[in-house]
Each structure stands twice: as C-alpha cells, then as structure tokens.
Image: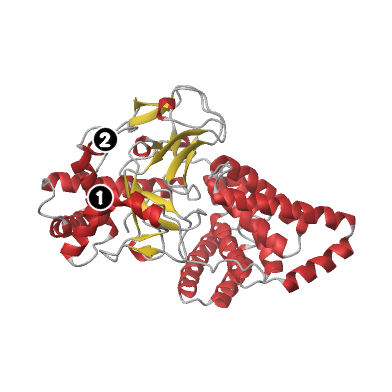
Amino acid sequence: MTRGSMENVEVFTSEGKGRGLKATKEFWAADVVFAERAYSAVVFDSLVNFVCHTCFKRQEKLHRCGQCKFAHYCDRTCQKDAWLNHKNECSAIKRYGKVPNENIRLAARIMWRVEREGTGLTEGCLVSVDDLQNHVEHFGEEEQKELRVDVDTFLQYWPPQSQQFSMQYISHIFGVINCNGFTLSDQRGLQAVGVGIFPNLGLVNHDCWPNCTVIFNNGKIELRALGKISEGEELTVSYIDFLHLSEERRQQLRKQYYFDCSCEHCQKGLKDDLFQAVKEDPKPSPEVVKETVQLSKDTLEKIDKARSEGLYHEVVKLCRECLGKQEPVFADTNLYVLRLLSIVSEVLSYLQAFEEASHYARRMVDGYMKLYHPNNAQLGMAVMRAGLTNWHAGHIEVGHGMICKAYAILLVTHGPSHPITKDLEAMRVQTEMELRMFRQNEFMYHKMREAALNNQPMQVMAEPSNEPAPALFHKKQ
C-alpha cells in the first residue's frame, strides 16, 4: 500500500472544470494518494463541550481552557498543541464577551494564520487560501444576506490590534468556507463534529462515480484510491451521496457548489432505471406507479415527524404499511423502497427487534450492492450495520458474511488503522470463531450464546438519528 505525499499529484487544467489534480504515478485500491492536515478547523457550535478542539475526538471528560472557558481539550498535550491557533481566539472571545458561531470562528482562525504566515503557499500546500474558489458572485439573495450578517459579526469579533483585512477579502474567506468546508467526523467516523479547510483537497473535482474517497483519520484527511488509477488520470471524489436520480444530483450540485455535473453517470443517466425500477410481471400501470410514488413521499414526511418526536413504534408501523403497498409496484432497487428499508431496519435494531430488522437489512444490502460503487464507504457502513443486525438475530452465517464484506470495503475506504476498521476486524474474528463453533455443534452453540447474552448487557444499537450520515463536504444550512 502506498503512503501518500503531495509528490504523487500535480495541479492541471481539467477540461470544463477549471483546476484539478491528476496522479503522477499509478495507484491501486486502498492506496493513500495524499494526506493533509487542516489549514484551519473548528468544532461545531452544538458540540463544543463534548469534542476536543485539537484532535476532534469525542471524550467523556474534557479539560476546559481556564481563560476563555470555551475551548475544551482531551489533556494537556492537546491543549499545548492548540495554543498557537487558540491564543488569538482566546483573547478575542474574552474581549467580545461571547462565542461567535462556527463560521465566524473558522474565518477568524484562517485570517489569524494568514496574519502569522502571509498569504503565499504554506508548506505542503499546492494552492494558497487566497486562490481557492469562493463563488461569492454566484450567491443568491438569501446567501448574500447571510454573508452580510456574517461579515458584520466578524468585524465586531475581530480584534482591533490584529491585521485589518478588506471587506472583499473577508467575503472571500466566507465564500471559501461555504464551498470548500470539509466535514470532520469523530474518531469512529460516525458523527460529524466539525468543519475544516484543506486547500489541497479543495483542488479535487467532483464525479458521481469517483476514483477516490476522503476519510478523516487521526487529525488529518486521507485521499484514498478506490481502484486502479493510471498515471496522468484526474483524481475525483463525490461531493454528495450517489443514491439520487441524476437530475436530482445535478440540481443539488448546482445549488450547493455552483457547477453543472458533466460526469458520465449524469450525462447518460446511468442507474436511473434501477433507481425508479418497477415490478416486471405483472407490470403496474403508470397511474399506480404515480400514486405509489406520492404515497411514499407522504409516508417519508410522516416518518421524519415521528422520528423527530422519538415515536419509534409509529415509525415502524408507517414503514411496514408503506412497504406493503410498494411490494406489488416497486422493484427492490427502487429508491423509495431502499429509503424505507434503511429506516425500518435501523429503528427495529434500536428497539432490539433483531429478527424482523434482519430481513429488512438483507433486502436493503441486496439493493445497495446493485447501485453503489463496490468500494463505496457508505455501502461499507450499511453492510456492517446489516451484518451486526443479522448477528444479533442469531443469523450467524449471514452476519459473518456481511461483516467480512464490510471489512473488505472499509480496508479500502478507511484503511486498516482507522478505529472503525479495527472494530470491524475484532467483530470479524469473533463471528468467525462463533461460526466454527456453530458448525461443529449447533445445539451447544445456541446454549452458550444464550448464556453469554444473559450474562452481559446486549450491545444496544445507537438511537436512530434524524441526521443523515456525515456528508463529505460541510454545507452551511
């Protein structure tokens, strides 16, 4: 496996896309093309007391900065490492009398770094913050209004003794954050905890079926190859989840990133037929399909409401009813079916109804396998959850098979040192041992399993959240 460095890539002009990055050597699946630490990064407003402001790990007990009472750290080491970036912030918060939002905090951290190091290229960067895209000229009325509010707040927060920047430059930095902000996840990759600017990553263009993925691991991002990449080939990542119709993906990219996607999957509408697939025999009429689409949309809205109120049994009831009505109409790769299968399997697992959850989870994985890139990180995480659900339900062979499949995907997308991959490796070893025991003596296996589960608290699935999985790039809502 290759450990990446910036010598492995070079900036070039990508046809129809502006700047891009291309490989200067050949890569294979799981190779790290390059790794990069954040130029600047901050913890989300909602998590400032629960996540270390240096390493972004979630911790039960954090030490608080004695001066501003705002910054939190794992220990003295993290606090010491943070001081260069926190020093100005610390006195600015005390002077301002309150803590501004994450956008203002990130903009200020970027500008304090510019003040310290100048605007040129910093070590290991192929592009300066000044040269990153800001797309301010494409902002709609609402975004312009938000920008003005952010700039006004920033000017009140920014200390008079610090270097003074022009309104145009401040707007540029907010624009850069808006379209280049990368979501930082906690150490297990399961929760979005902050946002950072990674200039080199900002040069990697989008493709709906990319050849690379990005993962945040141990304080830095890694750009990882998903398959063979030839020397001279452009490096791409997907800015959004693939599981949407091509026209919906294009609209989302236009709205959030201000460009028209011209990738092969969008131009040819690849997989759109599977996303909207209906039963073949007997084939439902267009009227029935239209009615079932509307019913599915209405049900998803009701589910969102019930989930936000914690009414999980109601969510299950709504899913069961709607899946029953979809059954004679939609095929198993239809996006409406998959959205319900994903929700119902997660909620039933949380309610510890593993037997029923396991059947839905299996159907979901079968559908996902036909749609996602074989080395897609979200596919890997979904297969892992389905494997756990099946294992909890006592379907040891299916569960072990899925955990092995998920492990193979995560070795590529996350790498062997990522905490979630290590967790999965431990599960794989455990389920393999159990499977051997199961095959030798099924009766004894069930007896021992029952005793083990009675003696230890059942590993409860995390409470279902209305939050989607952490998106790759952070968009201000």
Q: Are marks 1 and 2 in contact (CB under 8 Å)?
A: no
Q: Secondary structure at mark 1?
A: helix
x, y percentage for residue 467? 45, 63
Query: Which mark is first along the chain, 2 or 1?
Result: 1
Report the residue at 56% width, 33% height from top.
227
SS at badge 2: loop
**Horizontal placement of 54 versus 326: left or right?**
left
Mark 1 packing: few (<14 Cα in 10 Å), some, or many (20+)? many
Q: Nearer the viewer, mark 1 or mark 2?
A: 1
Identify the image's colour scheme: rainbow, by chain, secondary structure or one colour: secondary structure
**Residue under numbered circle 2:** 128
Q: Quadrant of residue 52?
A: bottom left
Position of 123 with respect to 328 (left or right) is left
Q: Amino acid at mark 2?
A: Ser
Where residue 249 is drawn, which disc sits there?
A: none
- Is 1 rendered above or below residue 330? above
Q: Of 398 and 200, which appears nearest the observer? A: 200
Q: How far from the left and from the top, in percent, is residue 396?
A: 76, 58
